[in-house]
Image: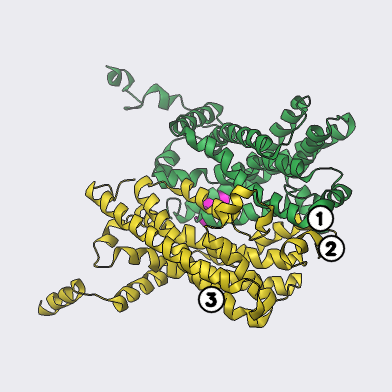
Chain colours: A green, B yellow
Amino acid sequence: MTVVETTGDEGDLSADHTEFKVRSLDWSISKLIALKNLRIALRYPANIIVWGIIPLLWIAPYLLMMTAIGGSAGNTYFSEISGFDDFIRFVVIGWFVYMYVDNSIWGIGNTFRWEQFSGTLEPLFLAPVPRISILLGGAFSDSVQTTISALVLLAFSCLLFGVTYSVTMILPVIIVLLLMLFALFGFGFMLAGLIIVFKDPSVLTELVDAVVFTVTPVNYPIEVLPKYAQVLSYLMPATLAIGIIRELTMTASFEPGSYLLGVLGLLSLLALFWAVGLAVFRYAEHWTKERGSMGGF
Amino acid sequence: MDNDESFNERLMSRRGWRSEFRAAWALSIKTWQIELSYPLSILWFILMPFLWLIPMVLAGSAVSSGANSASLADMTGISDWITYVAIGTALMGLIISTLWGTGMTLRREQNVGTLETLFTTPVGRTTFIWGNGLHNIQHGGLGVILQLGASILIFGVTINAWGIFPALAVVALLVIGMQGVVYAVASIVLVAKQGWMLVEFLGSTLVLLAPLSYPLAVLPPLLQMAAAGSPLSWGADAFRNSLVFGLAAPGLIQSMLMMLLLDAVYLLVGGIVYKTTHRWVRSRGALAQF
């Protein structure tokens, strides 16, 4: 009997418990959480596809409005201020990248809130594993789902709007996307901390999403923002990433100097967002536990 | 005991529009109390109208060097594109608030475990929906006022004061028509439970087909035809034209007549769909299922 073998000085504790060491980050837990989330997501495969199609209904009003206002001269003026000749291609690739930003806000930031709605938050928090590993696991699974949705969006946009992009630059694009994604994980950790404190995720998430969307050059070049908003915009990893990816996919040209500079910028933001994100999350967790309001709505 | 009995008897025998309105008003106040108990909700409520408008204005300024657009003037008779977009999108908050806030009412009650309790009260089944609709008209209506006020102060949008009266009539007709859509949304929620995806799709499609930030002329012909069947499409143009041109707004009477007709159809169809769905879901004992 297993129970008899493990009794003694350790009482009823199994080897799993006695040999367990608390770590600050446990990758195996992240992997488990990611697999668990993906298994749940695969039960609703339509969700992932639909999330690639619904954003088309959000992109279209911007494109239609820009067409109505700009008319035939619209592209000329747009080209003068942005350096790109076609605002439809410009906007579509912007939305493709922004899907990842949306994911960091709605997915990673809300990880614990979704667990709370499912009634599994407190059991999860009783497990002797680092909370960050749980968040990171959620971030991995969300990123896989977002990649599928973003690719569906890009494919449908190419079909509907007749836009094309260079695929020869796929490798540098993937490197930039990955760096941005990891930097956004830090942003998601920060939001997760705020949501633990403020509870109502819909309002906070909507607020953050709306502000980030406004300062990120998704539908318009950064030059149309006021100067102070441009500074704020450059603090977002997506701004740098969208700029580099647009350059690579729309002009099909690769300039090593500016590319490396962009990558260095993303690496700096990655370090900054992880440091701030982890600090905010740990402080929020401590603050909430002290007040005993972790499971409150 | 006698008092209790008479109270219960009176409660169960309550009838008429006045008592239904009182119940609807209580639901509306209850929703305000819940919303205001989250401090961030208040901040979001104030900022939301601007945060939706600003990206639109920025996107417009990326294709237009000034405040006037010759292309827009050709299609609509309004050359000031900021005024055009600001007035049109002011309605967006009201529409989204009505669709999401009212349409998802039953799901929200279900999530917090009060749906069955609510359905055991002697209140008309449709009152639950339009009671929350009453709240969302106040909520969305305040948003419209906030956005228009900010547009005037920040972006220099000008409105014709005489146009406020027909614009209010247009909003009233629009809200009535949207109530039909809301009944359909509530039916989807009753059957599909997690119907938010359909609601998102329906809401985004309605917004796409409405001339909120662009004239219908830029839509493909097939979508233009579909847009003619939406009260929001007629309402958005009539609302904006009233506020820009005042009482002499072009096509105002025609738009209002079309809205009256569409309102009757939407309300009738929406009401029948909701009542049938409600009966069907209850007969299957699936009301409280998640």
Q: What amino acid is at disc 1? A: Val
The earlier-in-sequence mark between 3 and 2 is: 2
Which percent across, then down, holds residue A239? Answer: 76, 44
Check disc 1 and report its element: helix, strand or loop: helix
Give the magenta-colored segment's residue range: A193-199
State whether discs 3 and 2 lie on one chain.
yes
Cα gap from disc 1 to disc 2, whole angstroms: 12 Å
Label 3 with label 2: CB-CB less than 8 Å: no
Which image quadrant is residue B103 in?
bottom left
Identify the secondary structure beneath mark 2.
Answer: loop
A173 above or below B145?
A: above
Chain name for mark 1: A
In which quadrant will I find the N terminus of chain A? top left
Q: Quadrant of residue A65?
A: bottom right
Gap in angstroms between the C-alphas marked 3 and 1: 37 Å
Name the residue that disc number 2 marks.
B66
> Residue, x 31% and y 23% (percent of image)?
A7
Can residue B37 be seen by looking at this rendering? no
Front residue of this view, candidates A49 and A195:
A49
Cα gap from disc 3 to disc 2, whole angstroms = 33 Å
| Residue B72 shows in the view | yes
Residue B13 falls left or right of residue B198 = left
Give the residue number, with chain letter if any, for mark 3: B169
Q: Is residue B208 above or below residue B241?
A: above
Is residue A195 shown in magenta?
Answer: yes
Q: According to the image, label 1 marks what residue?
A: A224
Q: Are marks 3 and 1 on the same chain?
A: no
Three-letter amino acid code at disc 3? Ala
Q: Is residue B36 found inside the magenta-colored segment of the image?
A: no
